[in-house]
């Protein structure tokens, strides 16, 4: 029975309204979830923690941290005690919205309440102690901001509570160190967390390999791929996905190991995967540095053929930046870009030619006609 029919029949109970909120959340429509919840309130049907958490989950998906914060406060006013799921959803909303300071405030209040009666009316929060999920979500917020110092502080607090790090902890720390400009520190941090009992998963390996790529550590990236395939260090054997291999392509290309990078690039294509724009750009740049024009043309065509039909301005710009010498040598390659990007790409190349002509003419513009 749909919600409208249930309301009309007078059969819209709390579970019915909650199911509607959950359905809206799963459909990725937080506005509809909030509307369904408001209808429950208007109908005088009391919401329980399950209904509130369903709404918080929807708001977290949309990154609406302010609305999520208001919902948690309203739970207290309605004498419904928020639990760890409530707070974790609020943390997730803060993380998704790029609000690490707010996420830290939520975590600090959870640590202060900690089930010991410290919450009270003054805090506006309940008495749920933070879980490993709470800390991982806070770490993800800090990682998004590239706050390497904050990452270490929260990680220390997590371990001090006797909570075990997991694959998501590994991913947040590696990703945060990369974004914070400390990519080379990701590998030692990873090893320390493994020693503390963390078990890698695909998300964690991908974050590590990406950090190693940023650090130009091709050997480390290949070692991580091998460990991933072998299920080393207490993990289950996992086949690297297109993202894993793309990060490794970037690492190998940056380290000057072009042939190995090409091999991995071809593996992605053979598996039906899509190499990332960053991997294609890094490999193109490596081909240009080595003067390997045939390989460069092949990489360009493969990357262009996998581009979205409507074109991706950012991806095409990266391709052009990495393969500019290639394009100047083989301008016909521009036609392999998605139709929507061909004109923009031609403008970039034409502008470059005009600029060179202007400079060669002593700044008078006299050489523009001959160089067009």
Image (cartoon, grey):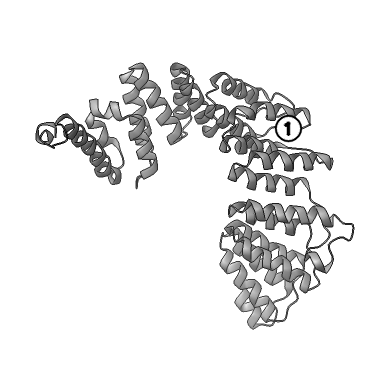
Residue 312 is at least partly visible in this image: no
User: Measuring 81% from the left and 67% from the top, which residue is drawn there?
Assistant: 122
Q: Judge left or right: residue 201 versus residue 311.
A: right
In the rendered image, the quadrant that contains the C terminus is top left
Q: Where is residue 35 in the image (x, y as percent from the top left)?
A: 60, 72
Image height of 7 relative to 346, above or below: below
Q: Judge left or right: residue 206 versus residue 282.
A: right
Q: Position of residue 165 (x, y in %)?
A: 75, 37
User: Measuring 47% from the left and 29% from the top, which residue is drawn there?
Assistant: 268
User: Measuring 71% from the left and 62% from the top, which residue is drawn there?
Assistant: 53
User: Measuring 53% from the left and 34% from the top, which residue is drawn there?
Assistant: 243
Image height of 71 relative to 113, above or below: below
Q: Which of 343 and 32 is in front in this view?
A: 343
- The residue that mark 1 highlights is 199
Residue 77 is at least partly visible in this image: yes
Mark 1, secondary structure of its residue: loop
Q: Position of residue 141 (x, y in %)?
A: 64, 48
In the rendered image, the quadrant that contains the N terminus is bottom right
Res 153 → quadrant: top right
Q: Position of residue 285 (x, y in %)?
A: 38, 25
Q: Judge left or right: residue 315 versus residue 271.
A: left
Res 200 → quadrant: top right
Res 46 → quadrant: bottom right
Q: Which of 152 and 316 is in front in this view?
A: 152
Q: How crowded is mark 1: few (under 14 residues within 10 Å), some or many (20 or more)?
A: many
Q: How many labels does the image show?
A: 1
Q: Judge left or right: residue 183 versus residue 199.
A: left
């Amino acid at each position: 029975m749909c919600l409208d029919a249930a309301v009309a029949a007078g059969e819209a109970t709390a579970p019915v309204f909650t199911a509607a909120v959950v359905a809206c959340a799963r459909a990725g429509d937080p506005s509809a979830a909030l509307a369904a919840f408001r209808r429950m309130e208007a109908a005088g049907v009391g919401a329980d923690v399950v209904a509130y958490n369903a709404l918080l989950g929807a708001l977290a998906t949309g990154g609406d941290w302010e609305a999520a914060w208001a919902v948690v406060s309203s739970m207290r006013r309605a004498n419904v005690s928020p639990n760890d799921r409530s707070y974790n959803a609020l943390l997730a909303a803060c993380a998704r919205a790029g609000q690490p300071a707010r996420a830290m405030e939520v975590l600090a209040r959870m640590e202060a309440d900690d089930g010991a009666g410290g919450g009270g009316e003054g805090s506006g929060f309940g008495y749920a102690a933070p879980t490993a999920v709470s800390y991982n979500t806070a770490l993800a917020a800090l990682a998004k901001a590239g706050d390497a110092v904050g990452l270490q502080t929260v990680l220390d607090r997590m371990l001090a509570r006797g909570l075990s790090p997991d694959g998501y902890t590994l991913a947040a720390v590696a990703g945060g160190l990369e974004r914070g400009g400390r990519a080379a520190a990701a590998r030692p941090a990873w090893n320390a967390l493994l020693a503390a009992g963390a078990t890698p998963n695909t998300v964690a390996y991908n974050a590590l390999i990406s950090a190693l790529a940023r650090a130009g550590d091709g050997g480390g990236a290949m070692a991580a791929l091998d460990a991933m395939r072998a299920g080393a260090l207490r993990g289950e054997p996992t086949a690297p996905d297109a993202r894993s291999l793309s990060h490794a392509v970037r690492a190998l290309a940056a380290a000057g190991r072009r042939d190995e990078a090409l091999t991995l690039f071809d593996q992605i294509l053979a598996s039906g995967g899509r190499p990332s724009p960053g991997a294609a750009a890094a490999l193109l740049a490596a081909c240009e540095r080595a003067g390997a024009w045939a390989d460069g043309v092949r990489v360009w065509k493969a990357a262009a053929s996998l581009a979205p039909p409507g074109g991706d301005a950012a991806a095409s710009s990266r391709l052009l930046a990495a393969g500019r010498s290639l394009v100047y040598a083989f301008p016909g390659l521009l036609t392999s870009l998605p139709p929507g990007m061909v004109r923009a790409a031609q403008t970039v190349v034409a502008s470059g030619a005009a600029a060179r002509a202007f400079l060669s003419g002593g700044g008078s513009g006299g050489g523009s006609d001959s160089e067009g």
